[in-house]
Amino acid sequence: MLRDLSKFLKVDEEKENAIQDLLFKSQHTMLRSKKLVFDEERMEMCENLEFAPFTKFCPKCHREYPMDENVCYECLVALKDISEKTPIHDIESKPIFRFSGENSLDDFESIFCESNVEKVNEFNINMNDLEKIIRNIKLTSLRNLDELINDNYVDLNGITILEKVLLFTKTFVNVEYKSYGQQLGYFEFETVTIDDRQTASLQITTMIHELSHFLLKEILVGVLCKLLDCASNRFIDVIVTYVLAYSNFTQLIDEYSAHCCEGRFTVYGYQDYSSFLNIIAQMDGEMSRDEIEITKSIGNTFANAIKDILEIFIDRDLREDIKSNFLNYHYESPNYEMLKLENCEMLTDEGFLKAIWLIISEGFAAAGENLEILNDYLEEAK
Ligand SMILES: [Zn+2]
Ligand SMILES: [Zn+2]
């Protein structure tokens, strides 16, 4: 019977419409209200962010905290204010490298006395002494690094490759920035100046290059202090600066060594080869081709000693990062012509000691005859 009624059914359009409307409306308003809640939540989150920024950090795990927090319960340590963290770029360092000795030779007169000239020529130094000098430099750099990290709450995992190299550079020298001229950077009297307008990869290579100049100088300061059994001071420093600058021979060693260090930690074939090509050009027949190659080999041998120092921080991982970062910026192919001319020889221990003897004994004698220049350097170094 019920079944029979079915043939009498029809759609109540009015009601249907009304219900459809309702369903639609409720759905619509529900959606709207949901959206509203969501937006409000977001607004609230934004407001929280705006009014409670992370102004504190944990000095141990370096996690950041809002200002109303006081403690990192994971590390069980009180939080520090973020203003106590200095950006690596602005960290000031005045690292001091010291060699000790019995004599304190505090003027040129006492340094260049006859018995000292004899000591230099006798050259009583062996590989063991050289290793001690290098160890001393490493130790001072690492102590400085430790101090810089602690004093400035540096998070090594939270800084860029450039900042890592910059921080490491600051363990050796004072770093200054320039924003003028073509020169990428230079090293002068315990200060490396870099152009911080340059790309990160160019700043990194420049720092490694200039750091190599500093380290070669510092190794020779160690050698001279050992020979004269004296403590290092600004007079010894100025003499070594002179020794590395007065002749094409020592300039070429210094420049080729820096060039090799730069290549070692970035990629060979991309450096500015003019740094040592200019020196060779100005020699004008002063040295035979073979002599120039041996001089480059001396530079290469120094570069290996310097590399050993740089690796206390620039380990394989960081080096790979530096290299890939460098290649990201340099799409051009390396300078194949110059790569063919790279000197890939180095001296034996015995040969290295003989080379250092040559540099120091000839240079020391020349320095002793040019006190005026040394005094000028002394003024500049102030
Ligand atoms: Zn923590
Ligand atoms: Zn250079």
Image: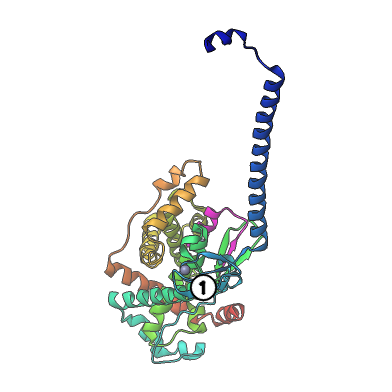
User: Is residue 61 positioned above or below 3 on the image?
Assistant: below
Q: How is the image coloured?
A: rainbow
26 relative to 229 in the view: left or right: right
Q: Residue at x 54, y 77 (%)?
A: 94
User: Is residue 239 positioned above or below 7 on the image?
Assistant: below
SS class, disc 1 = strand
User: Is residue 49 positioned above or below 146 on the image?
Assistant: above
Does the magenta-highlighted stretch encompass residue 201? Answer: yes
- The magenta span reads 192-210
Q: Which residue is mark 1?
A: 71
Does the magenta-highlighted stretch encompass residue 162? Answer: no
Amino acid residing under circle 1: Val
Neighbor class of circle 1 (other Cα within 10 Å; few <14, some 14-19, many 20+) is some
Asked if residue 282 shows in the view, the reply is no
175 relative to 249 in the view: left or right: right
Residue 330 image offset from top left, x and y in percent: 51, 45
Seen from the viewer's position, the closer of residues 170 and 275 is 170
